[in-house]
Amino acid sequence: MKEALFYKKLAGKKVQCQLCPRFCTVAEGKRGFCGVRKNIKGKLYSLVYGKLCSINADPVEKKPLFHWSPGTSCLSICTVGCNLDCQFCQNWTISHPPGKEILGEEITAERVIEITKENNLPGIAYTYTEPLIALEFYLEVMKLARKAGLYNVWVSNGYTNPEPAKKAAKYLDAINVDLKGDIKFYQKLCAVPNEDPMKKALKIYKKNGVWIEVTNLVIPGYNDKKEQVEKLVLWVKENMGTDTPLHFSRFYPHRKMTDVSPTDVKTLEMAVRVAEKAGMNYVYLGNVPGHPKENTYCPKCGTVMIKRSGLMVNSIKEKCPKCNTKIRIAGRRWLR
C-alpha cells in the first residue's frame, strides 16, 4: 500500500478523497466508490500500488489511438477498480471485481520499464480500467518511462478533478477519452451526477500538449439519435479541433445490458457522416472489423493514407500522393 495523493483529513478520522469529482468521504476502515482507496487510521491509502491485474502487449490502435505512433505496439497494464459504474462495461470483472477483491501480482515501477524494454516496445498504455484510480503507482511508472524514452498513453473515462489531470498531463503523451453522452446518459448508465468533469479534463489535457483522441460508444436507445451525435461532434470540434480523431464504436450486449441489441452499423455510419459534414477530418467506425472507416483518408481528396486490417496497420502515407496534403500523425519519433 501507499499513502494516496489528493485527499484531505476530516474530523473523526474521516478523510475526503479529492482525486475525482465524487469527493468520497471515507470513514475509518472503509473504501471509496472506486474500491481501491481505503481509510486506514485516518489516512487514505492506495490498495493497488504496485499491483497489476493485467500486463500484455497490444497494438496502440486497440486503445484506440489511430494517429499516435500508428503501427506500434505498447505494453498495456492495469489495476482493478474504477470511479464509474457503467452498466455496459466490458471489463467489469476487474473494474468492479466481486467482493471488491484486490486482484493482481506485485510488481515495481522499475520492473514495468524492464519488461517494456525486454519486449522491444516503444511505450506503455495504462488501460482496461480507469488509470486515474492508480495514479500513485502510474506516476512512478510514467516518470521512469519518460526518462527511458518510452511513451505514455492513457485510455480514460475522463472523470477526474483538474489538479490530478494536470499532474498526469506532465508525463502523458497521448490519451483517448471516452466521451459517452449527455448528462442524462451519465446519470442513467454510469452512476455519475454530471458530464462537465470529462470536458474540463479534455481541455486540460489539450492545454498541456497531450495528443487527444475521443471515443463515443453508440448504444441503441441511449445516445444514438442524430441530434445527440451532432451535439457531441460540435463540442469536440469547437474545443478540441477538427484534427482530433473521433471514434464511433459499436455497442455489444454486456454486463447489465444484455437485453439491448448491438448497434446497427447504419447508425454508426450516420454518426460518421454527421461528424464529417461538420468538418471533422479523421472520423472512424469501431468494433466493425473490415469496415472501410477503419482506414485513414486524406481529408482533402479522400485517398487512403493509413490502411488497416482490424488492429493491424498495413501501410502508412503521411503525405497524400494525389494532392500533397499531410495528415496529422503524432508520436513520429517512435515510428519504425
Image (cartoon, rainbow, N blue to C red):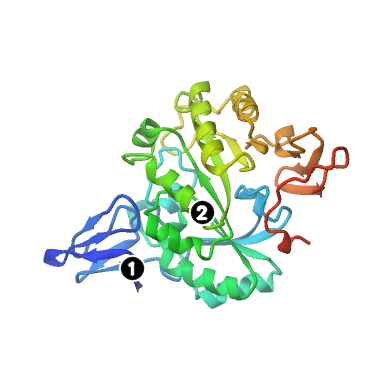
Q: Is residue 152 left or right of residue 53?
A: right
Question: Between disc 2 and disc 1, whose residue precedes?
Answer: 1
46 in relation to 215, above or below: below
Label 2: how many Cα within 10 Å (few below 14, some 14–19, many 20+): few
166 in relation to 230, above or below: below
Front position among marks 2 and 1: 2
According to the image, label 1 marks what residue? Answer: 4
| Disc 1 secondary structure class | loop
Please report the residue visible at 77 percent of the width from the left and 34 percent of the height from the top: 300
According to the image, label 2 marks what residue? Answer: 207
Type of residue at label 1? Ala
93 in relation to 146, above or below: above
Question: Residue 162 appears in which quarter of the rendering?
Answer: bottom left
Type of residue at label 2? Lys
Q: Position of residue 33 (x, y in %)?
A: 30, 52
Label 1: how many Cα within 10 Å (few below 14, some 14–19, many 20+): many
Q: Where is residue 177 in the image (x, y as percent from the top left)?
A: 51, 47
| Disc 2 secondary structure class | helix
85 in relation to 53, above or below: above
Q: Is residue 34 visible?
A: yes
In the image, 257 versus 249, the foreground residue is 249
Say which mark, if any, is on residue 50.
none
In the image, 90 versus 74, the foreground residue is 74
Please report the residue visible at 56 percent of the width from the left and 57 percent of the height from the top: 209
Q: Position of residue 329 (x, y in %)?
A: 71, 51
Q: Is residue 283 left or right of residue 143?
A: right
Question: Residue 255 appears in which quarter of the rendering?
Answer: top left
Quadrant containing the C terminus is bottom right
Please report the residue visible at 74 percent of the width from the left and 33 percent of the height from the top: 292
Q: Where is residue 62 in the image (x, y as percent from the top left)?
A: 63, 49
* Structural distance between the alpha carbons of marks 2 and 1: 26 Å
Question: Residue 110 appears in which quarter of the rendering?
Answer: bottom right
